Image (cartoon, grey):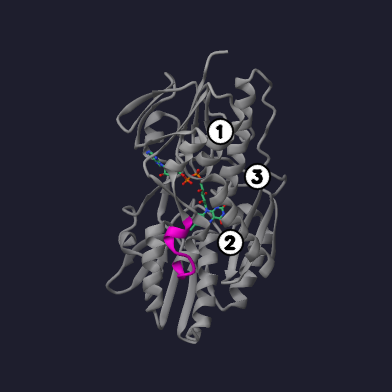
Amino acid sequence: MAAKTVLILGAGTGGIVAAHRLRRMLDKEHRVILVDRSPVYSFAPAYTWVMLGMRDARRISRDLRSVEKKGIEFLLGEVQELDPANKHVSAGGRRLDYDYLIVALGVDYSSDEIPGLGQCWTFYHLDGAEGLSERIQTFASGRVAMVVSALPVKCPTAPYEGALLLDDYFRRRKIRQDVDIHVYTPEGAPLPSAGPSAGERVLELLSSREIGFAPHCELAEIDQRSRQMRFGDGTTAPFDLLIATPIHACPTVLQRSGLAGSGGWVSVDQETLATAFEDVYAIGDATDIHLSGDNVLPKTGVFAHGQAEVVSRNLAAEIAGAQPIWAFGGQGNCFFSTEARKAALVTGNFFAEPAPDVELRGPNRRWHLAKVGFERLWLWRWF
Ligand SMILES: Cc1cc2nc3c(=O)[nH]c(=O)nc-3n(C[C@H](O)[C@H](O)[C@H](O)COP(=O)(O)OP(=O)(O)OC[C@H]3O[C@@H](n4cnc5c(N)ncnc54)[C@H](O)[C@@H]3O)c2cc1C
């Protein structure tokens, strides 16, 4: 059998799992090449802990070049062009030919579409979480606005987690009575794609902790000088500290390649993650999987991970001449920190019909310890 090359674009959650799984399952003559523009991986579920000074950025970051000791070829460089019809990619100034391609490029962030958004605080990337950590330590009183600037947003629990953790943090500093916390979101209720039960539990948590919740808020403009936000319906809200999610888009290189469909994201078969192009698969945040109702599968690491397992097992089978039998089933578990030492677990089947069958368990100390254990296991297992 001829040696095959599997090229994986993006060494985040999905790409790193796919690369390791394939390397372990494929015979040595086959190549596994992993490409990323950054030499460093960081564990996003801990960004809210970085924001609160509970984690050092270095502790949750790893050098991606370490994958080479496992036999994975790592190429540091920007993916500039994809030609899925002719099976090659330009990355880091090189042309890479492949037999199979796995696209795991996540999302591109932007802020230009909403005036003032670029000057806001965010914990949606590691630098932002570190900067916010310093700002929060000196914040003594006033109005904190946690704003979902646009949908889709990755890890839809994270803005609620951020608000709950800030509530806990200000209580521990004994200044909570001087701080108002509000969540503003375009969603009609928290976590719509998880079904009504999990969202209702999040609302109960917010209300029990005196955190305001404003749904249907389409952020239009932020005036940093007067500290006012304006929404699409003309209403305004004041803030002293505004923490916002960036606007998420499918990476431009995927849009240019013809891989992204009319919805702007990469359309895939929800079970096999196959794209419209032969031998090209896409996993994780760059994809668009529609659920019952108007909902789409949330952009979370747990799904990028599960999809990477399915695609790599099926490719390994195909390359070995066996039948690919694995299917992604929409099952997911996600930890949701609610206090410094407590977490809940959002768990269930997002593909269930007629509605997602997802519940929120806890919060309690056990799920917090499980999240800490998962963080350690993840960083040890892949690096
Ligand atoms: C604050 C926060 C908290 C979160 N908490 C959780 C959680 O608790 N549980 C959970 O399941 N998920 C969580 N997530 C979501 C999770 O991190 C993402 O859904 C997941 O990482 C998506 O995996 P991915 O492989 O699709 O993309 P990513 O992990 O984002 O990886 C994409 C990779 O592609 C690279 N890349 C992009 N474009 C290019 C290019 N042109 N050239 C070269 N390289 C490129 C990037 O550098 C990156 O390494 C959280 C996210 C955030 C922001």
Residue at horizontal 57%, vertical 40%?
289
Tell me which residue sits at (30%, 30%) in the image.
93
Please indicate, yes or no, whether residue 269 appears anywhere in the rendered image.
no
Which badge, 2 or 1, is on the more N-terminal residue?
Answer: 2
* N-term-proximal mark, 3 vs 1: 1
Q: Point out the frontmost of discs 2 and 1.
A: 1
Q: Is residue 223 left or right of residue 197?
A: left
What residue type is disc 3 on? Ser
Q: Which mark is residue 268?
A: 1
- Mark 3 or 2: the one toward you: 2
Q: Position of residue 24 (x, y in %)?
A: 59, 33
The residue lying toward the viewer, choosing from 185 and 266, is 266
Q: Earlier in the sequence, mark 3 or mark 2?
A: 2
* Element marked by disc 3: loop
Mark 3 — residue?
292
**C-alpha gap between disc 3 and disc 2:** 17 Å
Q: Is residue 56 magenta?
A: yes
Which amino acid lies under the numbered mark 2 shown in the image of this protein?
Pro
Q: Nearer the viewer, residue 271 or 19?
A: 19
Q: Amino acid at mark 1?
A: Val
Q: Is residue 371 above or below residue 134?
A: above
Viewer-proximal residue, 373 or 94? 373
CA gap between label 2 and label 1 equals 26 Å
